[in-house]
Amino acid sequence: MKKSSNSAELRVEGCNLFKQRLCYSLLSGKPVTFVDVRPFDENPGVQDHEVKLLELVSEITNGTNVVINKTGTQVRFEPGMLNGGSVEFDCGNTRPISYFLEALLYIAPFCGQAINAKLTGVTNKEGELSVDALRACWLPVFSKFIMDDENLIIKINSRGFFPGGGGSVTFTSPVVKKLRPTKKLNAGKVRKIRGLAYVCKVNSSLAHRMIDAAKKRLHGFIADVYITVDQRKGPQAGNSPGFGIFITAETTEGVFYHGESSSKSAGDGNPSTAEDLGGEAADMLLTEIWKGGATDTSAQALALTFMAMNDQDVSKYLLGEPSLYAIHTMRNLQTFFEHRFKFDELRGLTEDENEDSEIDKSDEMTGSQNKAVVTCLGIGYLNLNKQIL
């Protein structure tokens, strides 16, 4: 990533982290130019879902200017003001709704008006983060940084599997003047496991087979396991058949971990059996529990972003094994906001260095040995877009 002659403008090569860099451009007010976007691919340039994301950003902002060259291999993005408000948007079927919802979660607290978005498209796709995961694991992290989370809602109106789509999701979020500093240093112990086996346009017996396979894998870990069936028909089942399972574990400290697995689309390699999906979701959940931390791995980037955007006060968060995406998130925050984080390995903290009595020593003794305490002094970001009545 390079800075152009205009010190406020950034120039990046490729399309990696495209969504996150757009969000940080909106928050920082710095224009960004993406060059050499897939120049050697069979289909060079920006893809349909990236164009859709630019359209969604334009819908909720005022004054945003996007210039794409003829080949699509260069995109210049000039951010406007974050208006928010009500919006209905078709996300297409190439990427799930969660791809677009992630971007809205990053910028939602800093809009002028509360966002009320109705997004249509694919809710579940094999190998992609689902809307269920954002609702279960991202919203608890989001709510820790705002004072009032009463209107913070993600509602799945109808499910839509890849490739036909047909799903619908409603997202509402409050706006704040500034975020509040947060200290979350204790992950707690897993106290219950809940789940949802969903089937659309297929036999409901598949749901029970997934549940049995997941419970068999979780047998002996905890007794309080309850997984329900979500069978949808007609318009609420979308345009493509499919099935999947989503499982969450809640700790005594209100931390949520998740595991999920979804069926492949027709003609996409060897089809997975219901037993395979149930076992995969349970294994993913157990891996997340083993990694530990005060947030699910998928939500680490959101926690780091809000820590940096915080009031000028210290925030601390206990992370499990930091993901590669979380590392790139911190690099992007340094690039756009010239902000850095302090990393301390949990196992390396001595009693003298550990001034926070909230840290539970059992977190150091169990699970992954790569847990880290991340400390950050907020930049004092104020929401100047918020309308004052």
Image (spheres, helix red, strand yellow):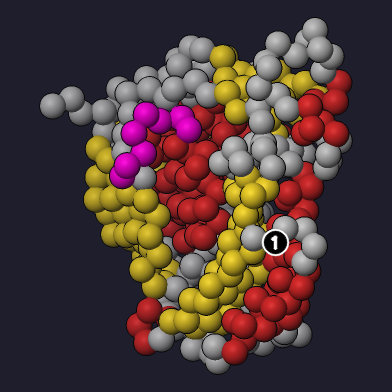
The quarter of the displayed image where residue 169 is located = bottom left
Q: Is residue 145 magenta?
A: yes
Query: What residue do we see at 73% from left, 27% from top?
Result: 360
Query: What residue do we see at 77% from left, 33% from top?
Result: 363
As drawn, 62 above or below 317: below
Residue 192 position, x and y percent, is 62, 54
Residue wearing tag 1 = 223
The quarter of the displayed image where residue 315 is located = top right
Magenta segment, principal secondary structure? loop
**Residue most extreme to the left:** 389
Amino acid type of disc 1? Answer: Ala
Query: What residue do we see at 59% from left, 67% from top?
Result: 226
Task: Find the magenta span and give its range.
Answer: 144-151
Please tell me which residue lies in front, 364 or 155.
364
Residue 345 position, x and y percent, is 81, 25
Question: Would residue 167 be seen by someone viewing this image from the given angle?
Answer: yes
**Residue most extreme to the top:** 352
As drawn, 134 above or below 113: below
Residue 288 position, x and y percent, is 73, 50
Q: Is residue 129 magenta?
A: no
SS type, badge 1: loop
Dot 1, how many residues are within 10 Å of its Cα: few (below 14), some (14-19), or many (20+)?
few
